[in-house]
């Protein structure tokens, strides 16, 4: 099985870990837990299926229980900055404020 085709249970654990480490359940599209795992793309696909009513109800309940966010509304500026820093870190970039200003 390729890394980007992980089973739901494995993804659920990754979501739980992400929420605990980052203080938010909004996983950015470009976030990867490891190179080429495409965690953010998976999360985006889950949100798409949710909006279309195609996500299994038990998956929705399990994701909500660990803190996954299906909606972006209500996210403050500081949460979005934290998400951007997480993306940069996952891509090997510097997350300092001075680096972002350049």
Image (tube, grey):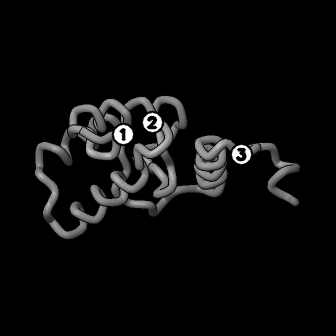
- Say which residue label 2 marks: 19
The residue drawn where x is 32% and y is 30% is: 13
Kindly identify which numbered label has been placed on residue 35. none
Using the image, determine if residue 56 lies above or below residue 58.
below
- Say which residue label 1 marks: 67
Q: Secondary structure at mark 2?
A: helix
Using the image, determine if residue 65 lies above or below residue 69.
above
- Say which residue label 3 marks: 93
Q: Secondary structure at mark 3?
A: loop
Query: Quadrant of residue 59 in the image?
Result: top left
View extreme (front): residue: 1
At label 2, counting other C-alpha atoms closer than 10 Å, the crowd grade (few under 14, some 14-19, many 20 or more) is: some
Side of 21 where 60 appears, left or right = left
The residue drawn where x is 27% and y is 56% is: 46
Q: Are marks 2 and 3 in contact (CB under 8 Å)?
A: no
Observer-nearest of 98 and 60: 98
Q: Where does residue 11 sit, x and y in percent of width and height?
A: 30, 38
Q: Where does residue 49 sit, x and y in percent of width and height?
A: 22, 62
Q: Are marks 1 and 2 in contact (CB under 8 Å)?
A: yes
Query: Quadrant of residue 89 in the image?
Result: top right
Q: Earlier in the sequence, mark 1 or mark 2?
A: 2
The residue drawn where x is 48% and y is 37% is: 34
Side of 8 where 86 appears, left or right = right
* Mark pair 2, 3: CA separation: 21 Å
């Amino acid at each position: 099985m390729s890394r980007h085709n992980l089973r739901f249970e494995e993804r659920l654990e990754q979501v739980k870990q992400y929420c605990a480490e980052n203080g938010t359940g909004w996983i950015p599209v470009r976030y990867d837990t490891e190179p080429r795992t495409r965690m953010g793309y998976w999360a985006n696909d889950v949100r798409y299926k949710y909006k279309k009513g195609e996500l299994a109800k038990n998956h929705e309940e399990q994701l909500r229980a660990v803190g996954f966010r299906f909606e972006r509304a209500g996210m403050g500026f500081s949460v979005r900055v934290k998400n951007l820093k997480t993306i940069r870190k996952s891509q090997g970039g510097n997350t300092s404020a001075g680096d972002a200003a350049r």
